Image (cartoon, rainbow, N blue to C red):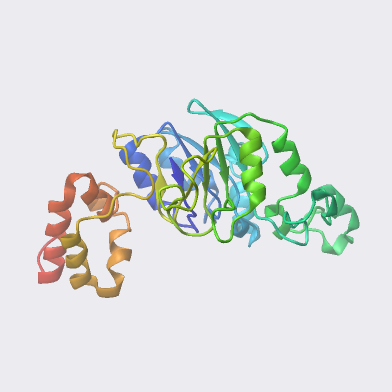
Amino acid sequence: MFFGDAHGDLDPVIAAVERFRPGAIMLLGDIQARQPLHIELQSILNLTEVWWVPGNHDTDTAEYHDHAWHSELADRNLHGRIVEIAGYKVAGLGGIFRSKIWDPRRPIEEAAFQSSDAMRRTMKSHERWRDGISRKHRSSIFPDEYQRLLRSGPADILVTHEAPSAHPHGWKAIDELAEKLSVQLIVHGHHHESRDYISEGLMPAAAPFCAFGVDMGSYLAWPRDPQGETWLGSPPSPSQDLLDLAAQVFGAEAQAWLDKPYTLLEGQTPAAFAAGGGSDKVRSILNSIQHGGVV
């Protein structure tokens, strides 16, 4: 299962793992863990394998950086390598393209810095962070990392923070990497959208790979979810009558309530619990809230 940008809220990840028990999960960047990642996810570490790639916001603060790169799950950072995970060879490319390092619309030879070490050598001591490159650029993609991954294939799946070129803000360099690695699937985060690029007509059905974007708080199960259902992308939405009832009770905050995990629902979100066959219970809770009853 692939999870979109958490931005500090890992409760939906925990709830989904407890419900579905996937063989492995991948966090697609912008985790921004509030505690070391192994502590945030300690309740599920015995239920699944946890892997991750960094996003641009994971270097916004020293705490976000250290809670990922210096956690006990630091070795599960897939950036720049290929690892066999749950029976698939999975390649990872975290971070984002920043023009100060490399604009991939230009030839790679024209990049300002080919590697983080090359950048470090140009920096004065006061510009460095912990005697290395600046913290911000530890979530930048350097040409040598990209080229090393390019030579490391083949792989089955490519996980990235950046999007492929089918996205309006995506990159052809991601497509080229996927094609060179001969992957069947690209999954990315970053843009807070759940997208099936082929079904939405953004990529031809004959494309060499399929691609999905995963929204913040959502997930993609591949190739089938652990309950044997065939849908891919974000979890199924609750029925329209539940959506209408939630809107009556919470107004503009209805979707936020539907997407927040609750102990009363076995740690699941109301949306996921309803989609899994518990719509009557969710409806009962909403009615109790609306009419002042006991939940």
Task: Find the residue positioned furthest to the bottom.
Answer: 251
Residue 167 seen: yes
Answer left or right for 274 relative to 181: left
Residue at x-position 17% and y-position 66% = 245
The C terminus sits in image quarter? bottom left
Q: Position of residue 218 (x, y in %)?
A: 40, 52
Answer left or right for 287 relative to 155: left
Q: Is residue 62 above or below residue 73?
A: below
Q: Foreground residue, 252 or 205?
A: 205
Residue at x-position 68% and y-position 40% = 80
Residue at x-position 37% and y-position 43% = 232
Q: Position of residue 175 (x, y in %)?
A: 62, 45
Which image quarter: residue 61? bottom right
Q: Is residue 177 above or below residue 262?
A: above
Number of numbered tags placed on the structure image:
0
The N terminus sits in image quarter? top left
Answer left or right for 242 relative to 72: left
Answer left or right for 215 relative to 128: left
Q: Is residue 112 above or below residue 18?
A: below
Q: Position of residue 192 (x, y in %)?
A: 47, 59
Residue 70 seen: no
Q: Position of residue 274 (x, y in %)?
A: 21, 51
